[in-house]
Image (cartoon, rainbow, N blue to C red):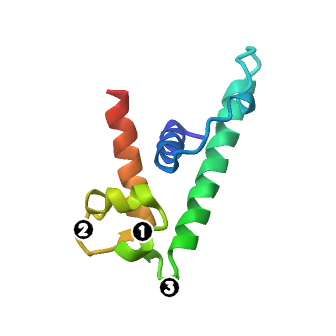
Amino acid sequence: MNLQALATACAVALLLALPAHAADDAPATGNGTAPRANADRAERLLTELDKRFNTADTDHDGSLTQAEAKAMPRVAQNFGAIDRDGSGTVTRAELMSYLRDRQADRQR
């Protein structure tokens, strides 16, 4: 998994406000187990984000209206910032872009 995907996954975790699962992350042992654990966690977080997005997208058009976004409160709270093109809907791509930008801001 590349660093951008890992950064996105971290941002997803912040957005979803999922509880930390520290026990899932293996300590660094010099044999690469910690990076694999982080990659596995990132994949789980991205899967969770997809599930929540799909559940919120009640008309299954691939985007969230403001009403649909209420099922994802942090998306609803930041709807204007996430809706980059001003279309009045949030696509998965816009959400991922927003999350990557937020993560980059936190790393500065």
Residue 47 visible in the current orientation: yes
From the viewer's perspective, tell me whether residue 71 is left or right of residue 27: left
| Sequence-first disc among 3 and 2 | 3
Q: In what quadrant of the picture does the N terminus appear?
A: top right
Rendered residue at 75%/15% (across/down): 29
Residue 85 badge: 2
Rendered residue at 73%/33% (across/down): 24
Q: In what quadrant of the picture does the C terminus appear?
A: top left
From the viewer's perspective, tell me whether residue 107 is left or right of residue 29: left
Question: Which of label 3 and label 2 is nearer to you?
Answer: 3
Rendered residue at 61%/64% (across/down): 51
Name the spot of residue 17 as percent of width and height, x first.
52, 45
Q: Determine the secondary structure under disc 2.
A: loop
Residue labelled with disc 3: 59
Residue type (three-letter) at the residue carrying disc 2: Asp
| Sequence-first disc among 3 and 1 | 3
Name the spot of residue 81 as percent of width and height, x first.
27, 57
Residue type (three-letter) at the residue carrying disc 1: Ala
Question: Which of label 1 and label 2 is nearer to you?
Answer: 1
Query: How much space separates mark 3 and mark 1, taking CA atoms?
Result: 12 Å
User: Are discs 1 and 2 less than 8 Å apart at CB?
Assistant: no
Residue 37 badge: none
| Sequence-first disc among 1 and 2 | 1
Residue labelled with disc 1: 69
Q: Determine the secondary structure under disc 3.
A: loop
Please, is residue 106 above or below residue 48 in the view? above
Query: How much space separates mark 3 and mark 2, taking CA atoms?
Result: 20 Å
Query: How much space separates mark 1 and mark 2, taking CA atoms?
Result: 16 Å
Q: Residue furthest left?
A: 86
Residue type (three-letter) at the residue carrying disc 3: Asp
Rendered residue at 42%/68% (across/down): 69
